[in-house]
Image: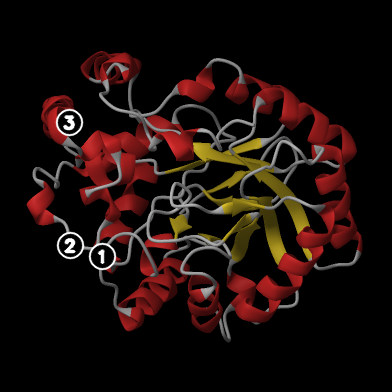
Amino acid sequence: MYQRTLGASGPQVSAIGLGCMGMSVYYGASDEAASVATIHHALDIGVNFLDTADCYGNGHNEELVGRALKGRRDEAFLATKFGIRGVGPGGTSGGATIDSRPEYAKEACDASLARLGVDHIDLYYLHRRNPEVPIEETVGAMAELVAAGKVRHLGLSEVSADTLRRAHAVHPITALQSEYSLWERDLEDDIAPTAAELGIGLVPYSPVGRGFLTGAVTSLDQLDKDDYRRTTDPRFQGENLTRNLALVERVRALATEIGCTPVQLALAWLLSRGEHVAPIPGTRRVTYLEENAKAADLALTEDQLRALEAALPATEVSGGRYPEAGLRLLNT
């Protein structure tokens, strides 16, 4: 796995990372032993960019990642987040509290360090921002964590271009994590250009549309009964599902023509957006991890990129990326 630099002069991370959220929550039953094995295999093949958060399973995911990293901490570039509290089954649309107070940043960091069982966090994100708290105050407190040696680099998630500029003026922001994929491209208007201008790396989450762009999900009946996509994700509901499946079929056909899987095509498209982009597809299984990692070796031609964007215009995707309550927390 080749590496990329997060931002203009930031740390080196694997071009494809590993999102660990689904190992604990939201996508049905999980197998902790299989999840640990997947993290170990990721490190074995050079996928060192691991992503978690304190709200994933209300701390469970950090504990799981921490157990997996025992004896192998130096092989991983470890990212976690704070700022979402009281998460229920519906995720951030289920009544969560957004807490970006400076004092909570410090409290949450210490709790994450304890759960992870490490002495520092490589990349510490503000997961969501409460607009009532000036971003300068939050980032100022996060900068103190850097000075204390508890955190190496700072990141933000789902903030506006203006917030990103204001934060970066207080302390260098290494990475912006936001939803970005063939499926979801709203940040291309001003947020992504601002990140590039400031030398901030872009870390796309849900890079294959919460599994939609794998081409494997054709019916809600395929999902576990407690998979949140069955009832909560608007793009998986009713007529939205029918229309979106037709779009995914176009991606599947193009992937077959190119000689790769739809997942690899979607990830390769993201990697083509710039050398500062490092997506973090999530998986609990070694087979899917390996499939994801192989996308880093796929170089798409200009003709293939144009064909792909014509096959799945972002304007044709049906449904919002979150329910209304979740949308209000984005790009603040």
Residue 225: mark in rendering:
2
The residue located at (29%, 60%) in the rendering is 27
| SS class, disc 1 | loop
- State yes or no: discs 1 and 2 in contact (Cβ < 8 Å): yes
Spatial CA distance of label 1 from label 2 is 7 Å
The front one of 124 and 293 is: 124
* Residue at image mark 3: 248
Is residue 234 shown left or right of residue 249?
right
| SS class, disc 3 | helix
Residue 249: mark in rendering:
none
In which quarter of the view is residue 245 placed?
A: top left
Residue 159: x, y in percent? 64, 34
At label 2, counting other C-alpha atoms closer than 10 Å, the crowd grade (few under 14, some 14-19, many 20 or more) is some
Relative to residue 129, is residue 11 depicted above or below?
A: below
Relative to residue 34, is residue 126 depicted above or below?
A: above
Nearer the camera: disc 3 or disc 1: 1
- Amino acid on which the number 2 mark rests in the picture: Lys
- Amino acid on which the number 3 mark rests in the picture: Val
Spatial CA distance of label 3 from label 1 is 22 Å
- Amino acid on which the number 1 mark rests in the picture: Gly
At label 1, counting other C-alpha atoms closer than 10 Å, the crowd grade (few under 14, some 14-19, many 20 or more) is some
The residue located at (40%, 78%) in the rendering is 36
Nearer the camera: disc 2 or disc 3: 2
Spatial CA distance of label 2 from label 3 is 23 Å
Residue 23: x, y in percent? 37, 68
Is residue 306 shown left or right of residue 147?
left
Quadrant of the snapshot with the N terminus: bottom left
First along the sequence among labels 1 and 2: 1
In which quarter of the view is residue 149 placed?
A: bottom right
The residue located at (32%, 14%) in the rendering is 315
Residue 28: mark in rendering:
1
